[in-house]
Every structure is written in C-alpha cells, then in structure tokens.
Image: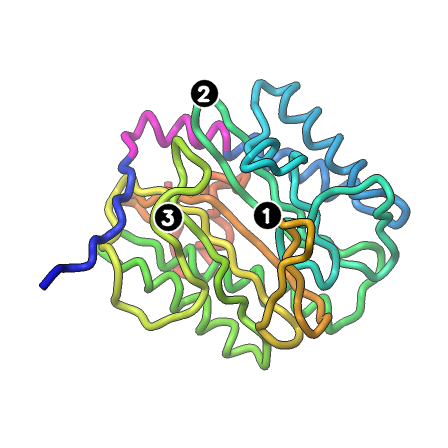
C-alpha cells in the first residue's frame, strides 16, 4: 500500500523571510496607491499602469505579468468576477461597484502576494458587509497560522468565521498557496474544511491565504479568455489575501504595513513581533 505524498513545503531562513518582507512591503504600498486611485470613471487598465510603474520604480518586478501568459501586472476583478480579471482600457469602474485587486511583486528573487477588495464610490450595505466578512475571515485564517497547528486549521478558521456571519458562497477550487522563490508553491490552502489535517506548521514556512466569498452561491465559471473566474449566478464576490510567515512569535504578515499587529491583537489578545 502506498502512502499519499505530502507536499514539500519550502522552509525559509530568517534572512530569507526578511527578503520576502521587502517584496511584501512593496506589494502593500502598491495596493495602498491603487486603493486611493479607485473611483468612478477610472479604468482597470489605468490601475494596472499605476501598479506596474510603482513596482518597477521601487526596484521590483511584477509577479503576474507574463505568468503562464497573463498579460498584466494586477488581476482586476469587478463585481461578479471572483479572481484573475484582466485589466482593460474599456473597463470603467462605476459608482456602486466593488473591485478585487490582486497584486504580486518580486524583490531579489522572492515573492509577495496580496489582494484587497475596494468599494467604488458608495456601495450597498449588503456589499459592504460582504467585504467586511471576507476580510475578517482572512484574518481569522492568518491568526490560526501558528507553530504546531495543522494546515487545515487555517482553512477551518476561515470557513467557521464566514459560516457564523450568514449565508455566503465560499468559493471552492481556488485558494491560498505556498510562496517564496516562486509565486505559487505547495501546498494548496482551501478556504473550507475540517481542522487537524495536513502538514504541521513550522517556523520559516510562508503562505498566501486568500478567501473568496460570494453573496450568492459558490459555483464558478471560467470565461473564454482563459483567466477570468465569475460567479455562475451573477452574484457579487469579494477576495482578500495576505502573505505571512510562520514564526515562533506568531504569524508575521509580510504584506501588511504593520505586519498584521493590529488585526492579530484584536483576534488573539497579542501580536507577533
């Protein structure tokens, strides 16, 4: 009888985690710039140009551009688009939209990856609540990423928070991943599942965690462009993501300006150093 092979997880030295922090900070500051730029009338291509210029001007290389043929620096997914939306010059944002902006950068060979969903102008209370629930579920997952935990403890924490907030569709088939010298590495991190399974977390492991949550059902469809994933029922979706490192002091969120201290302190009563 053969045992199923567990995924190999890259372990980083403290020095390598510091290099990932440089990439993560560049991604964080790029997303801050884009968040401020989001307004009715701007196009998703305008945002892409801003992102690429900022990343290259600050010594980084866009992770996404050219990745398996992807043509842009960011993924810009509007309303019912869940992930992997391709920026377009004719895609203008409108008041009431929500846009998921996913961004990655490489610095000295190390990757950072993060995403945020941003309201465009005034959005409905229902959409705003979706954004709040999705972002909070991300932080619940990050808080579970401690030394000695199992990988699916992250998945379970994400799902548990979402389920506690009402009826939402948790996207399946897409999720978080290992990250380091490549953008996507083993293992896949689902946004649902039972706790206590998978590899035990060790210092030096780094992961990108990214819940995707729909106002309607969970079913998805990939469009003919080969990239954009949408909700089958046309409902609005939200997507948040951070890259973090497992450390003896707790999760260190490499793509948050403050390394996640504020959010993690609210959830756990303490913060990583």
The residue pinned by badge 1 equals 115
Asked if the stretch drawn in magenta spans residue 17, the answer is: yes
Q: Residue lying at the far right in this picture: please name it.
A: 41
- Secondary structure at badge 3 equals loop
- Secondary structure at badge 2 equals loop
Which of labels 3 and 1 is toward the front? 1
Q: Are marks 3 and 1 in contact (CB under 8 Å)?
A: no
- CA neighbours of label 2 inside 10 A, class few (<14), some (14 to 19), many (20+): some
Q: In whole angstroms, how far apart are the C-alphas of marks 3 and 1?
A: 18 Å
Q: Against 90, is 120 above or below?
A: below
Quadrant (top left, top right, bottom left, bottom right) of the N terminus: bottom left
Q: Is the magenta stretch mostly helix, strand or loop?
A: helix
Q: Earlier in the sequence, mark 3 or mark 1?
A: 1
Q: In this view, does 25 lie to the left or right of 145?
A: right
The residue pinned by badge 2 equals 108
Asked if the stretch drawn in magenta spans residue 126, the answer is: no
- CA neighbours of label 3 inside 10 A, class few (<14), some (14 to 19), many (20+): many
């Amino acid at each position: 009888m053969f045992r199923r092979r567990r995924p190999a997880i890259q372990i980083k030295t403290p020095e390598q985690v510091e290099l990932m922090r440089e990439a993560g900070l560049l991604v964080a500051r790029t997303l801050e710039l884009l968040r401020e730029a989001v307004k009715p009338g701007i196009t998703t291509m305008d945002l892409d140009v801003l992102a690429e210029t900022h990343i290259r001007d600050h010594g980084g290389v866009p992770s996404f551009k050219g990745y398996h043929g992807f043509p842009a620096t960011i993924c810009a997914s509007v309303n019912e688009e869940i992930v992997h939306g391709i920026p377009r010059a004719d895609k203008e944002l409108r008041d009431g939209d929500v846009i998921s902006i996913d961004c990655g950068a490489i610095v000295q060979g190390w990757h950072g990856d993060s995403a945020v969903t941003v309201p465009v102008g005034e959005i409905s209370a229902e959409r705003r609540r979706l954004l709040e629930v999705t972002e909070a579920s991300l932080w619940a997952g990050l808080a579970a990423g401690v030394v000695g935990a199992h990988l699916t403890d992250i998945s379970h924490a994400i799902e548990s928070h979402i389920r506690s907030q009402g009826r939402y569709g948790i996207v399946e088939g897409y999720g978080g991943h290992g990250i380091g010298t490549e953008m996507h590495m083993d293992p896949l991190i689902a946004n649902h599942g039972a706790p206590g399974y998978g590899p035990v977390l060790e210092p030096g492991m780094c992961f990108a965690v990214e819940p995707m949550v729909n106002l309607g059902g969970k079913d998805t469809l990939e469009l003919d462009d080969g990239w954009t994933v949408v909700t089958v029922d046309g409902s609005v979706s939200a997507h948040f993501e951070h890259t973090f490192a497992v450390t003896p002091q707790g999760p260190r969120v490499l793509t948050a300006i403050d390394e996640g201290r504020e959010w993690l302190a609210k959830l756990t009563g303490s913060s990583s150093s």
